[in-house]
Image (cartoon, rainbow, N blue to C red):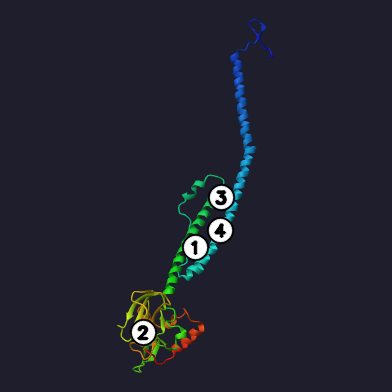
Amino acid sequence: MAKVKYYYDSETLSYRKIKRNKSTTFKYVAVFLTAAALFGFLMVFIASQYIESPKERQMARELQNMELQYELINKRMDDAIAALENVEERDNAIYRLYFEANPIPTEQRRAGFGGINRYKKYEGFDNSKLIAESNKRLDILEKAIVVQSKSLDEIAKLAEDKEKFLEAIPAIQPISNENMTRMASGYGYRTDPFTKVRKFHYGMDFTAPRGTPIYASGDGVITRADSQSTGYGNHIRIDHGYGYISLYGHLYKYNVKVNQRVKRGDLIGFVGSTGRSEAPHLHYEVFKDGERINPINFYYGNLSAEEYDILLRKASLENQSLD
Ligand SMILES: [Zn+2]
């Protein structure tokens, strides 16, 4: 039961009951409820600032876990970068050096991406720096892998070219050792067999019986197989490319035709004594960029160190050439 309240009426000099109407009661209730609600919200708000809810705790743990995972991923990136650095070092110091390609400078290998706005999208969070830095490192790593991959492509191409070059240059003796009677005369000043005058002999003479096989000393194309060059008699010229030409003189017979492509070691003709020749032998010359050079400097293809030594000694004796 609600308390009954009275007031003193000075006109009637008596106590009278206070009558409350319904609208006043309603106002009181509304004001009370509003105040209570506001106070409640305020309390919840204050509490939420200082006390974690179970859901918040869960999220905090997830965030912590994510940061930990980022750190682990960064460590793995360190390992990947270290492994790549090792490959890059070998690339510069061995492979590129071997193929005479310029080393790729570190600035070029480690170049990031230009523009500051690239990592702007990660800004505005507590972990912005961690995420932006991780992305930056991954970008640099990806770019470095691309640079390294391109370098290897370049080296593969250079290796292929070098292999072709090594197969092309005249690098073997054109007559097999078993068939050779002797290395008669080398490159240098020799006595002319006909005039007995000391003059420069621009090739090497290999003495061998008529009909002994002659082999191409490197890959190339036959450019001459005729006797239209003074002194050489029946002769063959092979264009090896890269500025190299080899010449085989005084042949008895040809085994190739002009424009024919030959491989190193292919049988191209037979020893004879045609042209300005004293006895059956092969006169062999090597041209580099139009100059006749000493063929002995190229016999690394099929001779052992001892054989090369013997050949070198015989070739340097100043004797009479067979021309
Ligand atoms: Zn000669």
Q: Position of residue 169 (x, y in %)?
A: 41, 76
Q: CA distance from mark 4 to mark 2?
A: 63 Å
Foreground residue among 46 and 122? 122
Q: Disc 4 residue type?
A: Ala
Foreground residue among 147 and 211? 211
First of labels 4, 1 by sequence position: 4
Q: CA distance from mark 1 to mark 2?
A: 58 Å
Extreme-top residue of the structure: 12
First of labels 2, 3 by sequence position: 3
Q: Which mark is residue 130?
A: 3
Q: Position of residue 278 (x, y in %)?
A: 36, 91
142 in relation to 32, above or below: below
Q: CA distance from mark 4 to mark 1?
A: 17 Å
Residue 211 falls in image quadrant: bottom left
Whether label 1 touches label 2, CB < 8 Å = no
Q: Residue at x 49, y 68 (%)?
A: 95
Quadrant that contains the C terminus: bottom left
Answer with the quadrant where ligand 1 appears in the image.
bottom left
Q: Is residue 261 left or right of residue 105?
A: left
Whether label 3 touches label 1, CB < 8 Å = no
First of labels 4, 3 by sequence position: 4
Q: Which residue is mark 1?
A: 106
- Mark 3 closeness class: few <14, some 14–19, many ≥20 residues within 10 Å: some
Q: Which residue is mark 4?
A: 80
Nearer mark to the viewer, of 4 and 2:
2
Q: Position of residue 262 (x, y in %)?
A: 39, 75
Secondary structure of the residue carrying numbered label 4: helix
Q: Position of residue 107 (x, y in %)?
A: 48, 61
Q: Is residue 46 left or right of residue 251?
A: right
Residue 57 falls in image quadrant: top right
Secondary structure of the residue carrying numbered label 3: helix
